[in-house]
Image (cartoon, rainbow, N blue to C red):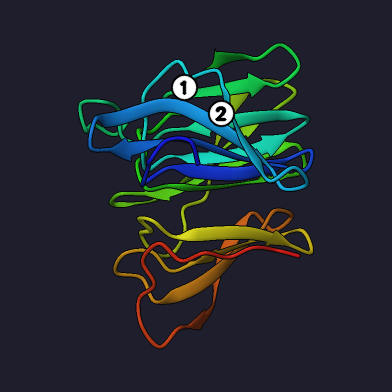
Amino acid sequence: MGEKRCLFASTLLDGLVYCAGGWNDTGYLSSCESYNPEERKWSSIRNMNKKRSYHALVSARGLLYALGGWDDESNATNTAEFYDPRNGKWEYIPPMKTCRSGLTAVVLNNEIYAIGGDGLSSVEKYNLDTKTWIDVPSMNEERWSGSACVVDGLIWVFGGRGANTVEFYHPAANKWQVSTKMDRERWCPCVLSI
């Protein structure tokens, strides 16, 4: 990486790994980088409009979406923005209904799900067509710094600070269900769907 950072968010888009925001000894960051694994090279891209860490980053429809996190004053924020690699610009989208830091996010059926956060079990989704946020039923447990992925049309959420369960959301049934307990809490776990 070109810049030292922790508490950043990352995702994949069109064969590149993107890392955005975070924190280092200079403070909160708005800087972003992409990594090309074929060339083994990092490149800087335009900074986000807002400094943020402990946020979520997802890709959908050829764009990157940065959601929530801590702002440069260590407050949870509800702001969200997208990056278009074709024109190299970040633009704001409507803010989430809830300020969220330590959230996780996934994309399912052309909707971005903002899941949990510090002291939160609530979930909301952003419809990419109507450009609106809609409430989703809350999870069974608060999840700060949990992790999520989509498998076979279900959203699976793992751990988080103080959480030792795995639960899934079934969009057709519009409800969350606990699947299993883990042997201990998993704070900042990493999961992915292959």
Left or right of residue 181, residue 14 in this image: right
**Considering depth in this image, is 153 or 29 the residue closer to the camera?**
29
Residue designated by label 2 = 133
- Point 35% across, 55% down: residue: 144
Q: Position of residue 156 (x, y in %)?
A: 60, 64
Residue 165: image x %, image y %? Answer: 45, 75
Residue sitting nearer the eye, 93 or 20: 20
Query: Gap between marks 2 and 1, in whole Å?
Result: 8 Å
> Contact (CB < 8 A) between labels 2 and 1?
yes
Specify the amino acid type for callout 2: Trp
| 62 shown above or below 167 | above
Q: Nearer the viewer, mark 2 or mark 1?
A: 1
Q: How many marks?
A: 2
Q: Quadrant of residue 141?
A: bottom left
Q: Amino acid at mark 1?
A: Pro
- SS class, disc 1: loop
**Image position of 46 with respect to 193: above or below:** above
